[in-house]
């Protein structure tokens, strides 16, 4: 499918959808009553708990809307790498970037957008570099399997990432970004508020050559990375209505990505991958009473993934469709008891040139979360999710958590335990050759405990705020799926691994008001020890050794200085420890060197009547570090980005 035809068809659908869900306006002007508070309410989710993040039974990091608004020219992958405990496995500029948590694989981290699951059912992952930060206004990360206490838990062995796309507050904007390696990004949007209605549309087009010079670690010479171009188009339209206790919204999102892939530098294999996706969500919510809130979400997506090896010039094509329906209800029984119930039903349709059949599985889950405020200081959080897969039958995912708050309200102790499973990907079952229809779901038993504190120690006019959080975790993982060679030399999917993952996550976030300036800072530390605990075959040398591509130590820090609303400066730095590329640590480059990655961004904002001008300049990889996140996939050296945005308020 060519870019022009794809864009034409999807743009027509987008315009028709927005037109069909927008009222016909009269010539008479109406007061603009749709303020920011109503726009926030248009994100329709029956909230699980009426609590702030520090009081939740699990660790949650929420990337603020202010941070998202300052970094609209990057991808969600870039934001997660700066601001969360999420690990990033990047194949370099223009290539795939996947996330993982607590040593688990990328397909064991669940990713949702507006209650819609985004993990690709064929391989279980998702390229987070393909998600524009400009389309996301809410980003929440919770680590570990007890994520079932704050979101969908089935399969979220590593953790959960949740994204929302609320309505922007601008009436319109245009933006242009340029930078090194042929980077050009154009964005535009227009939005209309009238009475209780809201409607809007925004687009983004990104082009990058990504041909850069890197240092060849083996030959000790400078070489050029080629066939790495990226051409991406994204569009999002939404419309919403709020009237008293009832609200409804519709969001439509399209992506079209043409990506040249250079392959590993050890043996370059030039290829190309085209990703086309259409996602649509319809949400409605109703406040039944002061104590009850109901919501209903329905959605559909289509994801076409086409791959071509330039040596054979042949295409491998796949298509995935998802239909989903999700009603939910939150009810506060009394001051001590609150319940949240959600039913999720989905059906998928998959067609792939690499499959011998066309799977069309169905999925159904019922989740119940409850909070029991037993005493003034102690709260229980029992949870259970029952899911049913057409191929594997039913399974119960129980979780139990508790929080304890001493007499001082600014300290919360928490603990949680849970048990869940993760079903095999469709590649594990149907790929030809090697798919194993008899492969079983993976299972994990998780424990964690932690403490969080919010402190405001200063009593003078320069207000200081400080949040400190620490979490220790342990996960026992069984029936892990790996592809291994058989007697005939062909790889196939089998249940092999018994693994143990344990570690610590520690964070400090703070802010200091200095007259007309404000400084914010954060520091994140993760220690993760994950290894195979049982021999998979006689003489297995990988038992007890750190799992490949999981660093034991990661440090991330970020500080920013804001001078009122006119100027801001932000410095980010991250340290990633040594990683191994093989199970038994016998690889030619094991271990990969640790590295430090630094970014510096400077931005300014000016108001001219009803127009706002935002300018931003950034230096990425400030230290010019030569490193690889994945073996034979070098990262780009120091590069630059500059952007200018005009917004109408």
Image: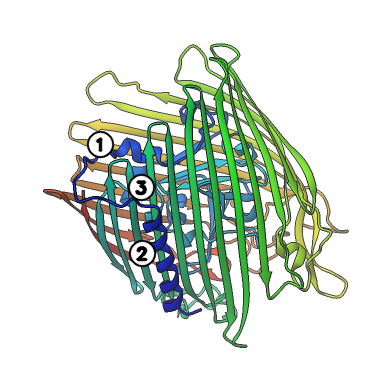
Whether residue 348 sits left or right of residue 649 in the image: it is right
Give the mark toward the camera: 3 or 2.
3
Q: Where is residue 631 shown, x and y percent of the image?
A: 58, 67
Farthest bottom residue in view: 312
Whether residue 38 sits left or right of residue 259 in the image: it is left
Q: In which quadrant of the rendered view does residue 16 lie?
A: bottom left
Q: Is residue 330 above or below residue 523?
A: above
Q: Which mark is residue 110?
A: none
Residue at 46% x, 78% y is 225
Give the mark toward the camera: 3 or 1.
3
Q: Where is residue 158 shown, x and y percent of the image?
A: 63, 46
Local crowd size for mark 3, using a 10 Å CA cut-off: few (<14), some (14–19), many (≥20): many
| C-alpha separation, residue under disc 3 versus residue under disc 1 | 27 Å
Residue closer to the observer: 298 or 590: 298
Q: Disc 2 on helix, strand or loop?
A: strand
Q: Where is residue 9 shown, x and y percent of the image?
A: 44, 72
Is disc 3 in contact with disc 2, using a CB cutoff of under 8 Å? Answer: no
Q: Which of marks 3 and 1 is nearer the N terminus?
A: 3
Q: In this view, does 303 lie above or below 335?
A: below
Farthest left residue in view: 609
Residue at 63% x, 36% y is 146
Q: Mark 2 points at which residue?
A: 204
Q: Mark 1 points at which residue?
A: 518
Residue at 45% x, 40% y is 62
Q: Mark 3 points at which residue?
A: 167
Residue closer to the observer: 63 or 214: 63
């Amino acid at each position: 499918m060519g870019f022009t035809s794809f864009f034409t068809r999807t743009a027509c659908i987008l315009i028709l959808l927005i037109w069909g869900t927008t009222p016909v306006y009269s010539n008479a002007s109406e007061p603009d009553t749709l303020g920011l508070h109503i726009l926030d309410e248009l994100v329709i989710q029956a909230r699980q708990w009426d609590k702030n993040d520090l009081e939740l039974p699990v660790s949650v990091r929420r990337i603020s809307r202010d941070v998202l608004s300052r970094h609209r020219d990057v991808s969600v992958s870039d934001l997660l790498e700066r601001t969360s405990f999420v690990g990033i496995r990047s194949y370099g500029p223009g290539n795939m970037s996947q996330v993982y948590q607590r040593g688990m694989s990328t397909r064991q981290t669940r990713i949702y957008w507006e209650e819609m699951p985004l993990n690709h059912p064929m391989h279980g992952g998702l390229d987070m570099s393909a998600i524009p930060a400009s389309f996301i206004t809410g980003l929440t990360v919770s680590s570990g399997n007890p994520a079932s206490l704050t979101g969908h838990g089935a399969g979220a062995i590593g953790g959960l990432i949740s994204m929302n796309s609320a309505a922007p507050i601008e009436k319109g904007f245009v933006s242009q970004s340029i930078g090194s390696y042929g980077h050009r990004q154009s964005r535009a949007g227009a939005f209309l508020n009238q009475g209780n209605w809201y409607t809007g549309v925004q687009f983004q087009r990104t082009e990058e050559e990504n041909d850069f010079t890197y240092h060849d670690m083996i030959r000790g010479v400078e070489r050029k990375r080629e066939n790495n171009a990226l051409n991406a188009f994204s569009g999002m339209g939404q419309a919403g209505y709020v009237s008293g206790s009832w609200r409804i919204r519709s969001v439509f999102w399209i992506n079209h990505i043409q990506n040249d892939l250079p392959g590993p530098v050890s043996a370059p294999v030039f290829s190309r991958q085209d990703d086309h996706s259409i996602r649509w969500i319809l949400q409605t919510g109703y406040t039944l009473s002061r104590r009850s809130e109901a919501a209903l979400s329905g959605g559909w997506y289509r994801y076409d993934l086409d791959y071509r090896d330039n040596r054979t010039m042949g295409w491998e094509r796949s298509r995935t469709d998802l239909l989903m329906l999700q009603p939910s209800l939150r009810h506060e029984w009394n001051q001590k008891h609150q319940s949240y119930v959600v039913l999720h039903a989905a059906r998928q349709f998959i067609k792939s040139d690499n499959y011998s059949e066309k799977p069309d599985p169905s999925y159904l889950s019922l989740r119940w979360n409850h909070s029991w405020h037993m005493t003034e200081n102690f709260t229980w959080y029992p949870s259970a999710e029952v899911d049913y897969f057409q191929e594997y039958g039913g399974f119960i995912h129980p979780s139990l958590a508790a929080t304890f708050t001493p007499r001082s309200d600014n300290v919360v102790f928490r603990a949680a335990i849970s048990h869940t499973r993760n079903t095999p990907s469709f590649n594990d079952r149907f790929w030809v050759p090697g798919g194993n229809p008899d492969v079983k779901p993976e299972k994990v038993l998780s424990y964690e405990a932690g403490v969080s504190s919010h402190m405001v120690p200063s009593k003078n006019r320069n207000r200081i705020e400080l949040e400190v959080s620490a979490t220790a975790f342990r996960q026992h993982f069984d029936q892990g799926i790996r592809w291994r060679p058989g007697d005939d030399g062909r790889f196939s999917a089998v249940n092999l691994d018994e693994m143990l993952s344990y570690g610590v996550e520690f964070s400090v976030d703070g802010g200091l008001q200095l007259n007309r300036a404000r400084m914010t800072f954060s520091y994140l530390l993760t220690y993760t020890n994950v290894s195979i605990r049982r021999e998979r075959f006689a003489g297995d040398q990988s038992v007890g050794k750190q799992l490949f591509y999981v660093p034991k130590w990661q440090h991330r820090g970020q500080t920013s200085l804001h001078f009122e609303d006119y100027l801001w400066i932000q410095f980010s730095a991250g340290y990633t420890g040594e990683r191994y590329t093989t199970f038994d640590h016998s690889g030619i480059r094991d271990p990969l060197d640790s590295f430090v990655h630094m970014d510096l961004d400077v931005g300014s904002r000016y108001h001219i009547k009803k127009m706002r001008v935002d300018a931003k300049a950034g230096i990425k990889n400030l230290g010019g570090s030569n490193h690889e996140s994945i073996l034979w996939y070098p990262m780009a050296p120091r590069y630059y980005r500059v952007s200018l945005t005009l917004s109408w308020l």
